[in-house]
Image (cartoon, rainbow, N blue to C red):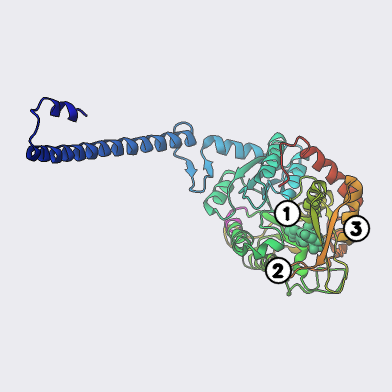
């Protein structure tokens, strides 16, 4: 501003005049600063607006498709090319048994293995997964990439999104639903109880609401858990044993799922099969599970907490290898009968089943660690501690004779063999050092 030049041409001011001139300059300066501020504010707002509009156009990349839904949580679905992908992924090979399966939780551990097994034998498979960050989402993305290569499209969305589920059934008449989406993990339930209610109860009900109302209704196979046996002391656990003493909220939500399944079977004629998985492990597994983070921490030289019971008693699990579980899941789908209802009305009694899928051979956690030490050729830094009161039970042991009879289920992989395959995968997967095991 030329305030100075304006003053330069004036005759030297008298002291009084000088005073007057000083306040004039001050006023002039304030007005000029105010003007500057307003101008900069307008420019900044305009800039922010421009950046926002630009980022929006990038996110939608291209002209907005009116049939495409953009949700606040960032999922995008709908539109003709999306529907084409959905249809193509769900189309069975003509020479197959013509099953069309919606697999929820497809980017999860069991979901990935089941989806690829079904696809391999020619079934039509569509995946659904919300890719939440309960554990490293990049592992889920790697599983998704594996499935994409096998021809399975994994739709990104939540089982609580009823509109999305309805859309999927509108595009494809699924004959089966393999429902594996869930909030897993026993101990995390004390940290985030709401996530268990959200996925294992609310999400399951939303899915069943959609399944009961479509025509034809699909048959549903879904993941329950060995944890429903809770404080049951009768071993081995068989399906008729008590399941009314859950030791964790996780177990309680799985047990609730079994009761909810009963209701939808009873009222709407949905065919429902629940599978009680016993501590499933293997390649592409879950980093929140002991065998997985023990491996990571043994390699890092970090201490691993090994739980033992109060009285120094053994804590053991009926660890079950993923390939055995996959066979059980596929057999459950193959033997599931059709639902009997249509468009929300029951037309007759429908199939309702619950099976144990375990290994029938519990192994103490201390032995699991010994096997890992041998396979990794590294001594573990063990920290033995009393089983905390966080929902863990002391012992699980499956009686699988019912699954054997009805599904031909016969686990064949012992822990040593299964862990060898896991460790081989783990070392290759994390070998580059680019990926971190958490
Ligand atoms: O069978 C099941 O239904 C359940 O199996 C696992 O639950 P869990 O058997 O507790 O599996 P891990 O968390 O891998 O624990 C395995 C064993 O290691 C022990 N453990 C765990 C963590 C630890 O720091 N130290 C330790 O000794 C546990 O007490 C348990 O005996 C899964 O996490 C559940 O999602 C699943 O439903």
Query: Toward which corner of the image does residue 7 lie, by quadrant?
Result: top left
Mark 1 and mark 2 lie on one chain; the one further toward the N terminus is 2
Which of the two residues, 15 or 70, is positioned nearer the viewer here? 15
Q: Which residue is mark 3?
A: 367
Q: How many residues crowd mark 3 within 10 Å: few (<14), some (14–19), many (20+)?
A: few
* Ligand 1's quadrant: bottom right
Mark 2 and mark 3 lie on one chain; the one further toward the N terminus is 2
Mark 1 and mark 3 lie on one chain; the one further toward the N terminus is 1
Are the residues flagged by discs 1 and 2 in contact, CB closer than 8 Å? no
Please indicate whether residue 312 sits to the left or right of residue 124 in the image.
right
Report whether the residue tagged 1 is closer than 8 Å to ligand 1: yes
On whether residue 336 falls in the magenta region, the answer is no
x and y percentages locating residue 287 in the rendered image: 74, 50
Q: Which residue is mark 2?
A: 248
Dot 1: element = loop
Marks 1/3: CA distance?
19 Å
Span of residues in magenta: 209-216
Q: Residue at 88% across / 70% down in the picture?
A: 313
Q: How many residues crowd mark 1 within 10 Å: few (<14), some (14–19), many (20+)?
A: some
Are the residues flagged by discs 2 and 3 in contact, CB closer than 8 Å? no
Which of the two residues, 197 or 192, is positioned nearer the viewer here? 192
Report whether the residue tagged 3 is closer than 8 Å to ligand 1: no
């Amino acid at each position: 501003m030329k305030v100075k030049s304006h003053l330069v041409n004036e005759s030297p001011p008298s002291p009084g005049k000088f005073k007057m001139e000083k306040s004039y300059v001050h006023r002039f300066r304030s007005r000029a600063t105010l003007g500057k501020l307003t101008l900069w504010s307008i420019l900044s707002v305009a800039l922010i607006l421009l950046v926002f509009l630009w980022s929006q156009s990038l996110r939608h990349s291209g002209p907005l498709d009116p049939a495409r839904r953009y949700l606040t949580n960032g999922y995008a679905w709908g539109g003709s090319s999306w529907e084409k992908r959905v249809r193509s992924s769900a189309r069975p090979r003509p020479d197959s048994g013509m099953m069309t399966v919606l697999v929820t939780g497809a980017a999860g551990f069991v979901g990935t293995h089941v989806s690829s097994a079904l696809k391999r034998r020619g079934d039509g498979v569509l995946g659904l997964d919300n890719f939440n960050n309960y554990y490293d989402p990049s592992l889920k993305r790697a599983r998704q990439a594996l499935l994409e290569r096998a021809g399975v499209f994994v739709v990104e969305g939540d089982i609580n999104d009823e509109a999305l589920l309805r859309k999927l059934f509108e595009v494809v008449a699924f004959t089966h639903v393999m429902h594996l989406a869930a909030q897993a993990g026993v101990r995390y339930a004390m940290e985030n109880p709401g996530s268990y209610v959200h996925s294992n109860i609310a999400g399951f009900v939303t899915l069943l609401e959609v399944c009961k109302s479509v025509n034809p209704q699909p048959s549903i196979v879904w993941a329950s858990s060995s944890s429903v046996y809770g404080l049951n002391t009768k071993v081995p656990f068989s399906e008729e044993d008590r399941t009314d003493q859950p030791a964790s909220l996780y177990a309680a939500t799985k047990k609730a799922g079994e009761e909810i399944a009963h209701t939808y079977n009873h009222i709407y004629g949905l065919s429902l099969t629940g599978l009680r998985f016993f501590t499933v492990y293997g390649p592409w597994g879950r980093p929140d599970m002991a065998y997985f983070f023990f491996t990571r921490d043994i390699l890092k030289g970090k201490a691993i907490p090994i739980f033992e019971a109060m009285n120094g008693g053994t804590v053991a699990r009926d660890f079950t290898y993923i390939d055995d579980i996959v066979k059980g899941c596929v057999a459950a789908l193959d033997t599931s009968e059709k639902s009997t209802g249509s468009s929300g009305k029951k037309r007759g009694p429908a199939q309702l089943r619950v099976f144990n899928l375990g290994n029938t051979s519990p192994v103490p956690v201390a032995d699991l660690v010994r096997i890992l030490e041998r396979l990794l050729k590294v001594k573990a830094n063990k920290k033995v501690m009393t089983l905390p009161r966080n929902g863990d039970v002391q012992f699980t042991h499956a009686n699988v004779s019912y699954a054997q009879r009805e599904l031909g289920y016969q686990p064949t992989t012992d822990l040593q063999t299964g862990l060898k395959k896991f460790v081989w995968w783990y070392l290759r997967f994390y070998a580059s050092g680019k990926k971190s095991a958490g």
